[in-house]
């Protein structure tokens, strides 16, 4: 258990801070610069308090016990963790949980990775060269038949049959922001969102998607805004109780574009601002009513935090209309 005070661990060590058993960090101001892994607890790695700045040539903060069932887990329940990693930012072989505190992955190949990922609170921000948040690893399970999108059917895959294994992602609270070059929110099994805020600024190439779920993506609460390319777009599955919309634009929108939804009375109900180029947006929140028609605008004035906020339509351009829950692209000028 780390104590109070300040500590700097330099790159003379292959691993910065490492335990062959478990590791609990409860206080202190610690800077780690490691040529291999930054902070490692083999059985478990827990952050309760303190401030940790980690630079690692390999993984940043992880637990990697693959031998004993029930071990190899990571818990962030307070404190501040900043990671720049050459490989995975925060990784657990079994379960990665963020319940409180602030976790920032400033640089990584994959930002958060574990067989099971649970986010119930706190603030997490991820920047990755590949997948942003990835439920993968461990043992594989059964296969799942995908449902194509469009024609009023909300599917959790872009179509075709893909393997869905024993991987889960559960988001019930907190704030998660992703900026990825690969898939944004990626589960090789199922994913469930019941609360919190999830913002994805996903890939610009059509070989990846802002949302990529091999099983079913169930959205029963919270706010989800996932922008990216159009090639592998994924929407909430039919088991979802909360509605949403899918917008596909005829041309790529530049970074900094405000995308706004107005209800039948003309009131703006949702505003999202792109952090980079995007050609599609999946948006779900409690303000969206299934079966209602919304008018899509780009431009106007917006005040947002992590991409989501409030806006006005002064100077905005109408792009078409979309019906909530049908998961068809925006119709009309600029839409497809």
Image: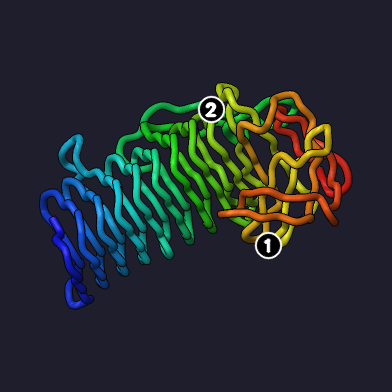
Label 2 – label 1 distance at C-alpha: 29 Å
Q: Which residue is mark 2?
A: 220
- Residue at the image point whose x is 66% and y is 55% from the top: 303
**Left/right of residue 148 with respect to residue 4 in the rendered view:** right
- Residue at the image point whose x is 27% and y is 40% from the top: 94
**Which quarter of the figure is the N terminus placed in?**
bottom left
- SS at circle 2: strand
Asked if residue 202 shows in the view, the reply is no
Which image quadrant is residue 161 in? top right
**Left/right of residue 160 with respect to residue 79 in the rendered view:** right
Q: Residue furthest left?
A: 20
Looking at this view, is 244 or 25 the one in front?
25
Looking at this view, is 313 or 45 the one in front?
313
Q: Give the number of the disc on residue 9.
A: none
Q: Is residue 304 above or below residue 119?
A: below
Residue 2 location (% of width, % of height): 15, 59
Looking at this view, is 177 or 91 the one in front?
177
Residue 178 location (% of width, % of height): 51, 53
- Residue at the image point whose x is 59% and y is 32% from the top: 236
- Residue at the image point whose x is 77% and y is 50% from the top: 312
Residue 191 location (% of width, % of height): 47, 34
Residue 126 location (% of width, % of height): 45, 56
Which image quadrant is residue 204 in? bottom right
Q: Residue furthest right?
A: 333
Q: Give the number of the disc on residue 255.
A: 1
């Amino acid at each position: 258990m780390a104590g109070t005070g300040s500590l700097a661990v330099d790159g003379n060590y292959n691993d910065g801070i490492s335990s062959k058993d478990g590791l609990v960090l409860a206080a202190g101001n610690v800077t780690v610069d490691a040529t291999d892994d930054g902070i490692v607890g083999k059985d478990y790695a827990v952050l309760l308090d303190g401030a940790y700045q980690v630079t690692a040539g390999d993984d940043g903060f992880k637990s990697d016990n693959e031998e004993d069932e029930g071990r190899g887990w990571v818990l962030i329940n307070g404190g501040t963790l900043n990671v720049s990693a050459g490989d995975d930012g925060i990784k657990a072989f079994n379960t990665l949980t963020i319940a409180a505190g602030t976790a920032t992955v400033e640089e990584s190949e994959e930002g958060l990775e574990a067989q099971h990922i649970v986010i119930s609170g706190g603030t997490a921000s991820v920047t990755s060269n590949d997948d942003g948040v990835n439920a993968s690893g461990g043992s594989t399970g059964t296969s799942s038949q995908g449902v194509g999108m469009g024609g009023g059917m909300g599917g959790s895959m872009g179509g075709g049959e893909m393997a869905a294994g024993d991987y889960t992602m559960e988001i019930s609270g907190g704030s998660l922001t992703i900026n990825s070059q690969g898939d944004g929110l990626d589960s090789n099994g199922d994913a469930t969102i019941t609360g919190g805020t999830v913002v994805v600024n996903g890939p610009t190439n059509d070989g990846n998607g802002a949302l990529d779920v091999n099983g079913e993506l169930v959205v029963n609460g919270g706010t989800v805004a996932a922008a990216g390319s159009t090639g592998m777009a994924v929407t909430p599955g039919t088991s979802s109780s909360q509605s949403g919309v899918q917008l596909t634009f005829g041309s790529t929108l530049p970074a900094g574009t405000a995308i706004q939804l107005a209800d039948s009375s003309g009131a703006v109900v949702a505003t999202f601002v792109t952090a980079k180029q995007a050609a599609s947006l999946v948006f779900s929140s409690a303000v969206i009513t299934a079966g209602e028609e919304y008018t899509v605008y780009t431009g106007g004035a917006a005040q947002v935090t992590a991409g989501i906020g409030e806006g006005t339509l002064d100077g905005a351009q109408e792009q078409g209309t979309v019906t909530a829950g049908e998961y068809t692209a925006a119709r009309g000028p600029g839409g497809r």
